[in-house]
Image (cartoon, helix red, strand yellow):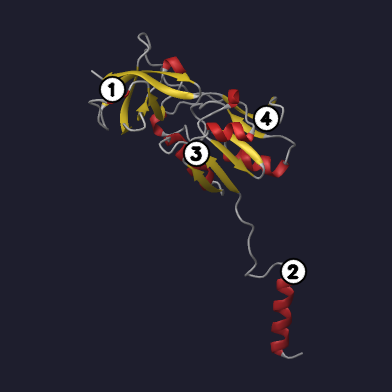
Amino acid sequence: MKRRDWIRWGAAWLAASGTGLGMAQPAAPLVEVWKDPQCGCCNDWIRHLEANGFRVQAFDSGNAGMRQRLGMPQALGSCHTARVGGYVVEGHVPAGDIQRLLRERPAALGLSVPRMPVGSPGMDGPEYGNRRDPYDVLLVQRDGSTRVYASYHQTQSAAPAATADRWAEGEVRRIDTAARKITVRHGDIPDLDMPPMTMVFQVRDPALLQGLQPGARVRFRAQKADGAYIVTDIKAAP
């Protein structure tokens, strides 16, 4: 056999055996994420996924409607809702648990880390002071029942802030007067049992936004109503 025939035969064999240099690699799993555009911890979670081999397509339209549409119970809700490989992923679920879900393919709706536990991916930046609260990743069945899929119970908690007068403190990051929204990077919010993070709040009375500017330190009270977080009072911090 001539040399060029050997080369041609070898190239054909490599292509047939799937070991050719030009063989297409499997695409990274695509995660679709619904979130608020100003939610800092959501963006940090997306970066966590991308650092662990996922592709991400984000929709900055909020997640309450999509959570309901996909069948994730409200009681298991968090600040973002995602979909990957036919599963629903709610909240700050570690990338490793999503990878395990896609390998094992259980008959289930998906995974949830309810609320926003400090120390979970996206909630573990330096602004949280190395705090690590225990939390569980839940496997959610289509009937809404759950079981623990993974546990993260190593703790290293920062000293709790004084909450005698139930005011939270933070820094204004953005104000949207037309939409009656304010973005605040805040500490613990006792009335909501919410850890430090950057969050978009609705404002009960647009007059509360008068005189506020991005960068201002503020004290505020907030409550949750109909799935929304609402600032009920706000003033300049002393």
Vertical comparison of 61 with 77: above or below: below
Among the two numbered marks 1 and 2 on one chain, the one whose residue lies closer to the N terminus: 2
Among the two numbered marks 2 and 3 on one chain, the one whose residue lies closer to the N terminus: 2
- The label nearer to you, 2 versus 4, is 4
**Distance between the Cα atoms at labels 2 and 4?**
40 Å
- The residue drawn where x is 55% and y is 24% is 134
Amino acid type at image mark 4 = Val
Among the two numbered marks 4 and 3 on one chain, the one whose residue lies closer to the N terminus: 3
Which residue appears farthest toward the front when viewing the image? 178
Among the two numbered marks 4 and 1 on one chain, the one whose residue lies closer to the N terminus: 4
Rendered location of residue 233, percent (x, y): 33, 17
**Distance between the Cα atoms at labels 1 and 2?**
69 Å
Vertical comparison of 35 with 158: above or below: below
Asked whether disc 4 touches disc 3, contact meaning CB atoms under 8 Å apart, the reply is no
Vertical comparison of 18 with 31: above or below: below
Label 3: few (<14), some or many (≥20) within 10 Å?
many
What residue is pinned by disc 1?
207
- Name the mark on residue 17: 2
Amino acid type at image mark 2 = Ser
Q: Quadrant of the N terminus?
A: bottom right
Among the two numbered marks 1 and 3 on one chain, the one whose residue lies closer to the N terminus: 3
What residue is pinned by disc 4?
140
User: Callout 3: helix, strand or loop?
Assistant: helix
